[in-house]
Image: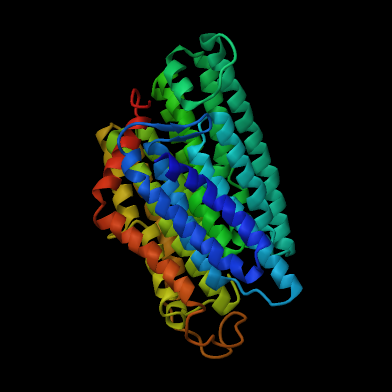
Amino acid sequence: MHLVLIALFVVPLAAVVLSYFAPAKAASPVSAVAGIASFGLCLALVPAASAGTQHALGTFLRLDALSEVFLLATTFLYATTAVFASGYLHISQGAEGQRYAKLFWGGFNLFCAAMVAAPIMNGLAALWVAVEVTTVVSALLVAIDGTDEATEASWKYVLIASLGLSLALFATVVMYYAGSSFFAGSYNLSFTNLLSGASHFSPGAVRLAFVLAVLGYGTKMGLFPVHTWLPDAHSEAPSPVSALLSGALLAISFYAILRYFQVTEKTVGPGFPRAVMAGFGVASLLLAALYLLSQRDMKRLFAYSSVEHMGIIAIGTSFGAPIALFGVLLHVLAHGAAKGTAFFGAGSVVRKFGTKDMEVVRGGASVLPWSGTMLVAAVLALSALPPFGIFRSEFLVVEGGLSSGGDALAAVLVVLVTVAFFGLSWFTTRTMLSAPPASGEGAGAEEVPARGEVSIWIVVAMVAGLAVLVLLGVHLPSDLASLLRDAAGQILPGGAK
């Protein structure tokens, strides 16, 4: 198991080196192989992680059920996004194109390496470093196309995320202070240390650390009111980067909050951290549901959908019931697959129609018979319709809310999710299921794009995403179900080890 964990840490880093220094045309297959290999290694760790114990490798690396759930979401997006990007990117053969390829694939693999590293970091300080690396690299990737809009979005992202991570670093310092009296001297912020001594920590300091962590990492997660970078960055970044930002990076930031959540529950009880998560969750879900009704930019629409789903996850965590937490962790996996697939479809539409404006795009499913149709399916999945995994996860979250006495909050969740559904379904009807315009018709359209797919690799990546969504919705593999139960048990009071 330790060799597999080492390989999982090393493979993306090796891909960084190879994709930058190898010939540019080799960077794409190298990245795809690295992503698929990382996902395979992660799958191999499922039985060990679901055994209910932690596996530490030296001082810095640690695997348990909770970290494995987020590794699965991240490595699956790594693999499918690398395949998608192989078909999405149109890179010229000149020197400038070759330079772009090296920079993109080098940054792509480094971004994924940092996100793979974050869940296996053994401690709050090392976790903060990994998340900080994701910020620096992803900001450069957002701006890589060099447009004014992308540069502005990247700069906004850097400013807001840096402020958030400064708060997260302060949270790390405050949490260290909270445990200093118990440990009586210097100590490391490993999760084992924190959880073993949490019941003796200063309650006031732990409360402060948790609020700072939610604000700080919530900036990267996309929680209201620190979400404002997210729509611009997702809209202006290349579609592969948007998929990773939405499907993986937001989940990694939520993972960091969960680690603080575990400690806070042990110190002050479940009431305070659950109330904080409920407040941020409702505000995020309300904002996203309203904004989804008024979007014209396809990628901004999916960005606000991400805010919506992060709100659902936060509310589900606040319920605290075992079934709700199981649903939350299942939602992390299902949202990653659905949002990745949606951005893959959006990328295909942008390549075919040359625009993200939903007032221009018409007949998408007719012009793109495979990726357009699968984009409709991904939107239905994001709208929590069966038989997809998000329907199952949201059902479990609501069931957990009702069983834990949170009837009013569960009702609010259902109402706001329904409002969000209308926004997403309106997009689907107008852009993908309408008839394609005749030549010269439409808002600015000069001609109807020829029927056919942009690339077979885009189709392959979307098929993989939808297959996982159906699997999560119809029949959870027994090992995965056991992993989710163990991970949910870690979040419960008294369950973390």
Q: Provide residue 319's location: percent of width, then percent of height.
A: 35, 34
Q: Is residue 57 visible?
A: yes
Q: Provide residue 252's location: percent of width, then percent of height.
A: 50, 43
Q: Nearer the viewer, residue 71 or 451?
A: 71
Q: Which residue reaches farthest bottom?
A: 439
Q: Provide residue 198's location: percent of width, then percent of height.
A: 45, 18
Residue 211 is drawn in which quadrant? top right
Residue 369 is drawn in which quadrant? bottom left
Q: Residue at x 52, y 27 (%)?
A: 210
Residue 401 position (above or below residue 59):
below
Colour convention: rainbow
Horizontal side, residue 225 vs residue 342: left or right:
right
Number of numbered tags placed on the structure image: 0
Q: Nearer the viewer, residue 33 or 78?
A: 33
Residue 194 position (above or below residue 145):
above
Q: Residue at x 52, y 52 (%)?
A: 11
Which quadrant holds the C terminus?
A: top left
Q: Residue at x 29, y 51 (%)?
A: 392
Residue 105 position (above or below residue 255):
below
Q: Nearer the viewer, residue 382 or 165?
A: 165
Q: Is residue 294 visible?
A: no
Which quadrant holds the N terminus?
A: top left
Horizontal side, residue 227 vs residue 459: left or right:
right
Q: Provide residue 159's location: percent of width, then percent of height.
A: 70, 44
